Amino acid sequence: MNSEAQHIDYDLLSKYFDGETTDSENKSVEQWAATSEENSAEFKRIKKAHEFTSQATLFDTNSAWDKMKAKMDAPSEEQKVIQLPSQEARRPARLKWAVAASVVLLAGLFIGLQKPWISNQTTFAAANVASDSLVLPDGSFIDLNSESSIAFEENGLKNERNVQLTGEAFFSVKRNVEKPFVITTNHSQIRVLGTSFNVKAIPGTNTDEVVVSSGKVMVTSSESGNSVELVKGEKAIVYSETGTVVKINKAPDKDLYWKTKTIRFRNTELDSVVKILEEVFHVSIRISQPSAGKIPVSSTFKDESVEYILETIAATGRLTLIKTGKNAYRIDGEGNSTP
Amino acid sequence: MRFQIMYLVNNLSHETYRIPNLARGMSTAIDNSDQALIDAIKRGSSGAFERFFKNHYQALCGFAATYVKDADAAEDIVQNTFLTIWQKREGLELRQSLKSYLYTSVRNACLNKLKSEKIRDQYRAENIGADEGGESSDHLEEMELSERISNAITAMPPERQKIFLMSREEGLKYKEIAEKLDKSIKTVENQMGKALKYMRVELADFLALVIFLNFLLG
């Protein structure tokens, strides 16, 4: 056998190191290795190359990352009741957490417990980036909006999955056909097998709202027992006084803004745009010239401030944006719908 | 033990024994891009952390598997190490690169995993106190070897990779692989030969180092 590198019979050597050679093949490999110093050294190198890769494995990085992601979002200690501290409504839904270690707390109890958490607020504010969601023992995710809380019994998730919600939260429920996941609010009950959806049940209001992102959700009024089934993109409003449940076929973007941080306008008149922005960002916006309110707006904004959104819209429509107060704006100009 | 020689290199003087081109592009020092990555992770950027995770996961698992001899255990260790870094990110202060910190952490976790004192002691004896280095010791050679192997596996043409992994990962005989894939045994032999040659070329400088040290140590 020639000792030049290009004449090395790797097929044979691979069989040899994998123990698949016959006696006569073994002999020919060993003879080749013994022919020269150089062959011997090369034999050793190839043997090492085989040894180094003898346990070579391809790991599934993407599915490992999915697992990691779930663990990263989970609170690091056993935490049963989560209450978000109240905050300025200037920027909507900047998530901050306060966490109590108590086992069971009913929603009403939170009011009395607000104070001790105020001192915790800075601590949680620092950690708020990763703490915008929690993972329940059953693997379901919950993203809580500000001033919202969720309560469940410690072993309440073992037999049935029951949680109580005050405020607003986005749920990604782990599918389990045996154990439906039930969310109870003041006015309604939401029953699912495995899906993702948003529930808005703000205390002191007369309605609960449910918006579904995926899967199927059953919403029932506690007052009347009336219920509707919702699928992806649909919305239900539960009216507490009448027990009526109204289904809306297309849920507006703004309903999930706190979660998606995305707001889209498609040929939406500025009057409507302003109403949506006022609601989402808790600001007041006045349009001084009625004609400007008819200008159509088409744009998508992701994670932008209301000021940036208004400036962009104003610039496109040849309008002038004036900041008249901390959370107040005025849009001047006749506007020109042809940019 | 596969890294026995490598540890010896660590304990000797690098300047004297390292093959010059071995450490090209590698450093345990913190450079600017590393600092930017650390900053992003400290700020809680899960995007930056995801890139960091995905860049190193395959190589780290291969690295961990050489200690714990079990792919699942290796994956657990690597995931837990990343998780700990993420959870403690705010206090992350590094004197070394994030990558060498990562490898050191994984290696320490692996050694802890080898619970039986007997196994650990045996390992230590074989590796001449190599695991006492803690954070300060760097593992350039191991890191680079794991990365090279990892890159080499992922860069193989699909058919060859499949055959290679069926042999290495699943421990199948060439004949079994040929039957499973409905190919001739000649094809399997040929692909395995090409894979071996490819590894020989990809790992060339490590192999030179190993042979060199074998020579030094008699």
Image (tube, coloured by chain):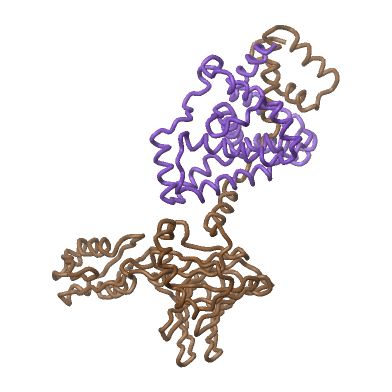
Q: Position of residue A5 (x, y in %)?
A: 64, 14
| Picture quarter with the N terminus of chain B | top right
At horizontal 41% and vertical 50% (from top left) the residue drawn is B43
Left or right: B130, with A209 as reference point: right
- Residue most extreme to the right: A23
Q: Nearer the viewer, residue A30 or B28?
A: B28
User: How many numbered marks appear?
Assistant: 0
- The chain coloured brown is A
| Depicted A198 relative to depicted A20: above or below | below
- Residue most extreme to the left: A333
At horizontal 63% and vertical 26% (from top left) the residue drawn is B199
At horizontal 17% and vertical 69% (from top left) the residue drawn is A324
| Picture quarter with the C terminus of chain B | top right
Residue B60, quarter of picture: top right
| Depicted A160 relative to depicted B97: above or below | below
At horizontal 63% and vertical 43% (from top left) the residue drawn is A59
Q: Is residue B180 visible?
A: yes
Q: Position of residue A130 (x, y in %)?
A: 47, 56
- Residue most extreme to the top: A36
Q: Position of residue A261 (x, y in %)?
A: 39, 63
Q: Position of residue A99 (x, y in %)?
A: 49, 66
Residue A294, quarter of picture: bottom left
Q: Colour of chain B?
A: purple
Q: Is residue A234 visible?
A: no
Q: Nearer the viewer, residue A200 or A44?
A: A200
Q: Nearer the viewer, residue A77 or A283?
A: A77
